[in-house]
Image (cartoon, rainbow, N blue to C red):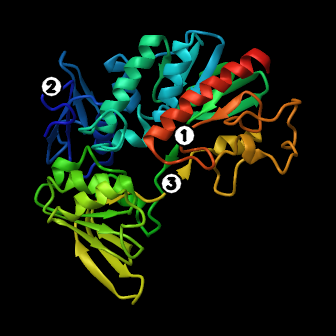
Amino acid sequence: MAGPASGKTPLVKIYGRLGSAEAYQLRDFLQRCDVPFEWIPLESDAQARLPVCEFPDGTRMESPTIRQVIEKLGWFANPSRAEYDLAIYGAGPAGLSAAVYGSSDGLKTVLVERWAIGGQAASSPKIENYLGFPEGTSGAELAERAREQAYKFGTEILLARKGVRAEMTAGKGVGYLEDGTRIVARASICATGIEYRRLEVPEAERFLGAGLYYGAGASEAALTKGEDVYLVGGGNSAGQAAMHLAGFAKRIFIVIRGESLKETLSQYLLDRLRSIPNVEVLPHTEVAALRGGKLLEEITLADRVTGQERSAKTRWLFVCVGGVPQSDWAGEVGIARDEGGYLLTGPDLLRGRQLPAGWPLDRDPFYLETSVPGVFAAGDVRHGSVKRVASAVGEGAMAVAFVHRYLANG
C-alpha cells in the first residue's frame, strides 16, 4: 500500500503489524505531511523491533520516534535567533497563513508545531469548498503548499515541538518547549486549534491505533478494502471522511446522535453522500462499548430513543466528533477563556465598556487580541470562530495586521 502522492517514489517504507499504534502514528504523520510512503504489513517482529522505517539511502530505523523520522527527512531545526518579532504556535491553516503574511511582511517569524503541518485540515482527504480549488484538494497538499510558501518567505518552522509552559507579558512572550527549547518573541499568535473529542467508553484508549482512530483516517482508507467501517460524527469532516472511505470499504455506517445529517453537513456533502450506495446513516445512535483482543473486533451500538443495544462486527471505527480547544497553557498564564476553554479576544473581552481585569493599556484590545497585549488568537481555538479552512486562513492574515499595529504603537 502506498501513501499520499502514491505516483511518486516513496521517501519512506514502513514495515509493521496491522493494529500497531506506533505504525499508525507514523502513517498518519507522513500522510498529513504529504510525504509519499509505502506500507508493508508483516505478521511478526521476530527479526526487528517493529515498526521499521526504511529510507532511500538504505537507512533502517527500528521503532523510530516521529522526531527521528523528521531529523532523517531533514526537517528538524533549532531556533536561529535569540528573539523573534513574531512567534506562531500551531501550524494549521490559521498558523500557516499567519506565517506566510508575517514573514512576507518582513517580520522575523518562527512557527512552532507539536505534531504535523496542517493541523486537523491535513487529515481531510478532500476539501472541495475552498476558494480557488474547483476540483478540490487534499488537506495535506494544501498544507504542504502553505509550508513551502512560508519557508520561501523566511519563516523558521519547528516541528515535533510540544509546548509545556509559557510566560506571556506585554512586549515579550516566552514559550518553553518539551525538549528545553526557549522561544522569545515580541508578539505571539496562538493558532493551536482543536482536537476531536474522545470517545467516552471503557477501553477506548486500549484500541487507539488498533481499530479506533480519531479524524478522517486518510492514511488508513486503503486498508479498509472490503470491510465494514463505522464513522462517528455528523459534521463536514465526518462527511468528507465517509466519501473517501466509501471508495475502499464495503460499507460505511455513519453514527449520529441526532435525527439526520441535514442540520450539520454542508449541502454539497449531503448531496454526495445520498448518491453513494454503500453509505448508510444510523440516526439516534451512539457507540456504547468496544471489544476485541489485540485489535478491535466488535462494537456495541445503542439506540438513544429505545435504549436497545446491538453488536456490530468491525475492525474500523473512526471518530470525528466536536472539538476540544488546545488552550491549557492559556489558563496557566492567565489569558481569558470562555467556559469551553476557547480563547476570548477583542470585543468578547469587554463587559459593556469595561476593559478586562489586568489590562495595562489605555486602548481596547484589538479584534483578535487576547487579554494579554501582544498575544493574539486565530482559527478554531478562538471563541466565536467559524470552523472553516477559509475562515482560519483569513484570521491568520488578519492577526498579522494587528501584530504590526501592536509592534508599532503598543
Q: Quadrant of residue 312?
A: bottom left
Q: Position of residue 321 (x, y in %)?
A: 43, 59
Q: Distance from label 2 to label 3 (Cα)?
A: 34 Å
Query: Helix or strand or loop: what does disc 2 sit on?
Result: loop
- Sequence order check, earlier mark of 1 and 3: 3
Q: For residue 102, what is the image quadrant? A: top right
Instruction: Tell me if mark 2 has few (under 14), some (14-19) or many (20+) residues whose alpha carbon lies within 10 angstroms of its own.
Output: few
The nearer-to-camera label among 2 and 1 is 1
Which residue is denoted by mark 1 in the rendering? 379
Q: Which of pointers 2 and 3 lies earlier in the amino acid sequence?
A: 2
* Residue tagged 2: 8
Q: Is residue 163 above or below residue 182?
A: below
Q: Quadrant of residue 83?
A: top right
Q: Secondary structure at mark 1?
A: loop
Viewer-nearest residue: 79 or 173: 173
Task: For the residues labelled 1 and 3, say whether their Cβ atoms are less than 8 Å apart.
Answer: no
* Residue 205 seen anywhere in this rendered image of the structure: yes
* Number of numbered discs: 3
Name the spot of residue 246 as percent of width and height, x first: 18, 57
Give the residue pinned by disc 3. Answer: 323
The relative height of residue 160 versus residue 138 in the rendered view (above or below) is above
Separation (CA) of disc 2 from disc 1? 32 Å
Q: Residues within 10 Å of mark 3 (few under 14, many from 20)?
A: some
Q: Residue at x 42, y 74 (%)?
A: 258
- Asked if residue 278 lies left or right of residue 285, the reply is left
